[in-house]
Image: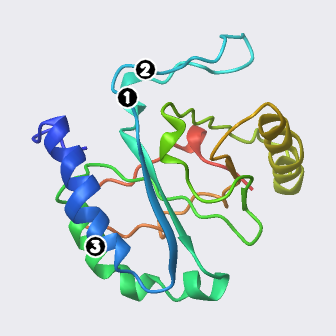
Amino acid sequence: MRADLPRETALGYWAGPHAEIAGRLPNLAEYVQRHFSPTDHGYWPSSPTVGTAVPTSRRCDGVAEVRFGSTVAALGMPPRMREVYLDEQNVFERVLGQVTGPGGGRWWTDGHDDAVGHRTILLLRRRRGVSGRAFRKYVHDRIGPALHEAGGRDLRTYTFLPWSRLVHPTLGVSHDNPAFRRTSC
């Protein structure tokens, strides 16, 4: 969020006027915002081989999921996203856009469940040397089913294409994503 805006004001703008602009996109199947707590981070047990702490400089205020009705609809979106891109500078200092390829996202439960109450988002980064296919298989065929069987509600799994600065061409908004945090080929 922009540092010159109080967090509540910025979140309100993101959830209100900005969401209305995004919601007007044609062929939009779903637009969902997940706002993160400013204090609750890193519940996963610490391990010498697994990074669990989110550096203060890299904390996120939340994520937005934008899902289109088809791959063809998604490919036709960039010219229509001009208003969204122009509005992002009103509320965001940094936006990291990630895109899934065909089959990159799976929904284990129907719709989204506002009654869930508490949400956990587990972000996994593919290690260098691990193929994209092997990583997608692990996320969708091992992690997803395990969480679903354990009773996860409103469960979705995503694997993203390699990071590209071309995904989000917003003027006045930083799109820096350090090389060590990017998915590599």
Position of residue 90 in the picture relative to residue 167 (left or right): left
Sequence-wise, the earlier of marks 3 and 2 is: 3
Q: Is residue 180 above or below residue 165?
A: above
Do labels 2 and 1 touch, CB within 8 Å? yes
Is any atom of residue 172 visible in this view?
Answer: no
Return the residue nearer the eye: 163 or 23.
23
Q: Position of residue 136 (x, y in %)?
A: 82, 52
Left or right of 6, for residue 28? right
Residue topped by disc 3: 21
Relative horizontal placement of residue 49, taking residue 36 as reference (left or right):
right
Label placed on residue 40: 2
Q: Secondary structure at mark 1?
A: loop
Q: How many residues crowd around disc 3 within 10 Å: few (fewer than 14), some, or many (20 or more)?
A: some
Percent across and percent down for residue 183 are: 66, 49
* Residue ID at (11%, 42%): 5
Res 81 → quadrant: bottom left
Q: Amino acid at mark 3?
A: Ile
Dots 3, 2 in contact, CB < 8 A: no
**Which residue bears the numbered disc 1?**
37
Q: Amino acid at mark 1?
A: Ser
